[in-house]
Image (cartoon, coloured by chain):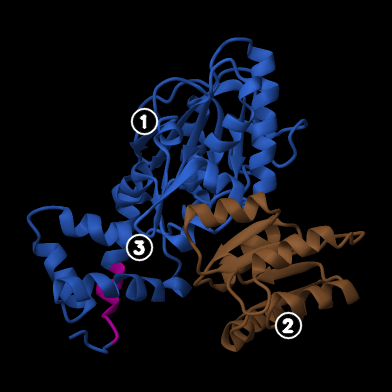
Amino acid sequence: MKTCLVVDDSKVIRKVARHILETLDFEVREAADGREALDSCLATPPDVVLLDWNMPVMSGMDFLRALKNAGLEQRPKVVFCTTENGMAYIRAAIEAGADEYVMKPFDRETLESKLQIVGVA
Amino acid sequence: MIENMAPSGGAMQLIGALLEQRTGQQIAANRAWRIETALKPVLRERGLPSLDALVGQLLGARSGELADQVVDVLLNQETSFFRDVAVLEQIAAAAVAMQAEVGNRRLRIWSAGCSTGQEPLSLAMLFAEKAAAFPMPPEIVASDVSTAALARARAGRYSQFEIQRGLPVRRMVEWFDSEGGEWVARQELVRRIQFRQQNLTADVPPPGKFDIILCRNVMLYFSLPLRRQVFDRLATAIQPGGLLVLGAGETVIGLTEHFTPSEAFRGFYRTAEAEPAPLAAAG
């Protein structure tokens, strides 16, 4: 079973994502900000991180940069999942090393498709 | 207001017959509910209370505009970018191999039943990424029976949900622009495709011969005799030794002698080397 870490400061979004991911046979972990997510990844790296952009404490971008510098043997795939749907944001995410990008609002098919593209579903 | 009454069997039969007559597609009895569900927006838009009332208007209509709309909404236009991505990558690999065989001749690909355009656009992206293998980008002809689907394909305009289905984000930013909440394929990509309205069961195929024909998830809606006819028609449009690609659940086996499983490309069908005799007349 693959593991997905859902990182979002919205409890509702985490709940919706968890529900979809569990139907896709993922084991789901949650974090409410980038700092919490980084700790979780350093303790036990998941297969994939579903990552919000704007969060308190540590943003999605800062998390991504910190994750790249963390020197993990196998870095989890990172899929941004955000309302920042402008081209400039998407390009910046790709340049920073994101593997995929989900524009909110999303549905099950979108999430499944993006997880397939990064090779974890 | 739409009545909550079951439509008469006659109304359902007539609508099913209209679809079959126009497109060759059949709706199985156990999927008749699709007729009601698909037509609800049409009833609402035209202020009609029931399917029986819609059939009444169809029978009395002076133009075919209502019938066109009914047929368009009944067609299953389910598609996505890079649907069955391994198959598309195999097609690109086959095209590269074929190009090496044919020298400088421009390859021709037909996406038959292209719906709203995601399949030919996916092919165009793949060929563009392999540009070095082709002296000229392969010519892509994309056809569909639905004028509404084709209009959308030509516009190359997709909702946020459609654009995220199957399309990797790097390709999205390379080939699409964001406009007012929608995503629009760049002209340099759309220009690589010729779109045409085409009824596979009735119309003569596009002119010329094709090296690869994709006809995925189309045949399954046709009766067996109609599938035979369509295979005969496709055989007249393909180069000797050309490839036919069907959907995962579709086969030529038992339906045509024109195509046999390809040894080089698993899951694809290859024409016999000898050119098939031309059809006496298009039905």
Is residue B227 in sight in this rendering? yes
Amino acid on which the number 3 mark rests in the picture = Leu
* Nearest to viewer (mark 3 / mark 2): 2
Residue at (68%, 79%) from the top-left corner? A33
Residue stretch in magenta: B6-13
Circle 1 residue: B204
The disc placed on residue B74 is 3
Tell me how far mark 1 sits from mark 3, CA to CA: 24 Å
Amino acid on which the number 2 mark rests in the picture = Glu
Between residue B246 and residue B85, name the one nearer to us.
B85
Residue at (65%, 71%) from the top-left corner? A59
User: Percent from the top left, x then y, of residue A35?
Assistant: 75, 77
Q: Element under label 2?
A: strand
User: Percent from the top left, x then y, of residue A96?
Assistant: 68, 53
Q: Colour of chain A?
A: brown
| Residue A52, picture quadrant | bottom right
Tell me how far mark 2 sits from mark 1, CA to CA: 57 Å
